[in-house]
Amino acid sequence: MPRTTKLTTILGASAAATLLATGCGSGAGGDASAQLYVADGGGAWGEAQRQAFFEPFTEETGIEIVPASQESQTAIYAAAEAGNPGMDVVNIAASMLPNWENAELLQPVSSDGWETVDTADFDPFPVLDHAVPSLIYATQIAYRPDTTGGDLEDWSDFFDTAAYPGQRSMGEGSVLANGVFEIALLADGVAPDDLYPIDYERALAKMDDLRPDILTFWSSGAESAQLLADQQVAAVSAWNGRVNDLAADDDSIAYTWNQALLHVDYWAVPEGADNVEAAQQFIEFASRPDRQAEFAGLITYAPTNAAAYDDIDEDRQAALPTAPGHADQVVPQSTEYWGEESPEGGLWSEVAIGYWQDWISG
């Protein structure tokens, strides 16, 4: 039987009820064999999905894609745990994946039978038994050289407000995809290969050093960009898509790929999905190099299938975190670590949030 996780207690029933109330379950009317309910990222992400994945899949297979709003990671998890995920294909952040696997809420992915995708091409995040990498993005340093007085080359420079003055902003540490623990350790001189297991005491001690210079911990990508655009802060840790847009609009903003922290999302088929066969077919389709290349051309999320770079021109590659030119600079976040059981009880992904909450309220 699936195990109940701590996340269930945190969420309660309300999140599940919210998603179920949308009425977008994969059995919600129509011919299930001809319809597939797939997580829709919304906004520019959703539009890129539509052009690169949804419409071409329907054209090729005749199976209609019904975009399903995925309001939040926690809401869809709670709905799946309640027995009605509301969609056939979900998109799961790496930090949430261990909770899904621990609760046995995902069906195996039939990648062994793929004919159009070579799973060996997935790099640096491999195909897993129950999930397939869907997109890669990064948390990187963006800054105003006219305020800092020089270029920030790594996270140690970001933390050094004496040498590079000005206020800072980082993402909330309770969202593990913001990478606060890893960033703090990199700033303190820990080598990328030695980040895990996380030394929480050391990471939070380093955060203590920067805390007086942190204006705020941002809670959305839009907020991170606005803080720098409005010159409220001199430097910010921000997602690469937001940074790319900022730098394109304002040539006084600079950024670096050095020590950019890579994050990955996954496609998966939840327990309770109504159209499993078509869901498996869609995940293979969306993993093809040609589809991934088109997606990366529409939005600055990197392809998870490295073979896609054969179809992406050099100018576009410069905006993508896993491009060959950035390979020696970026640092992949560990999916495996966050899914491990902690000696303190619970997954490290849960324990880390507790450490953060204690620190931020202290």
Image (tube, helix red, strand yellow):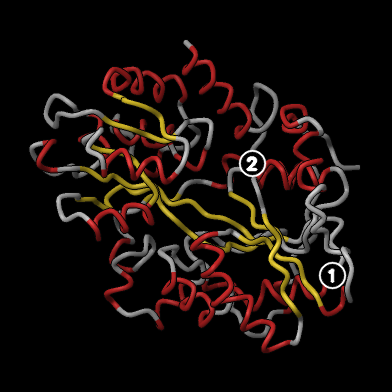
Left or right side of 223 for 263 = right
SS state under label 1: loop
Q: If the image is split into quadrants, where does the N terminus sit?
A: top right
Rendering quarter of residue 283: bottom right
At label 2, which amino acid type do we have? Gly
Task: Give the vertical position of 354 relative to 195 (above or below).
Answer: above
Q: Is residue 90 above or below residue 2?
A: below
The percent position of residue 38, horizontal first and vertical second, equals 70, 65
Q: Are marks 1 and 2 in contact (CB under 8 Å)?
A: no
Q: Which residue is mark 1?
A: 275
| 186, 75: nearer the viewer | 75
In the rendering, at what x and y percent does residue 259 appear?
A: 31, 47
Label 2: how many Cα within 10 Å (few below 14, some 14–19, many 20+): many
Q: Pick whichever of labels 1 and 2 is earlier in the sequence.
A: 1
Secondary-structure class at tag 2: loop
Which residue is at 46% across, 41% downward? 220
User: Residue at horizontal 60%, vertical 80%?
Assistant: 117
The residue where tag 2 is placed is 339
Q: Is residue 299 visible?
A: yes
Q: Position of residue 110 (x, y in %)?
A: 75, 71
Q: Measuring 61% from the left and 74% from the top, which residue is drawn there?
A: 286
Q: Amino acid at mark 1?
A: Asn
Q: Residue at x 75, y 38 (%)?
A: 15
Decide if residue 263 is on the left or right side of residue 277: left
Q: Vertical placement of 37 versus 77: above or below? A: below
Report, in whole angstroms, how far the alpha carbon at label 1 lies from the one at label 2.
28 Å
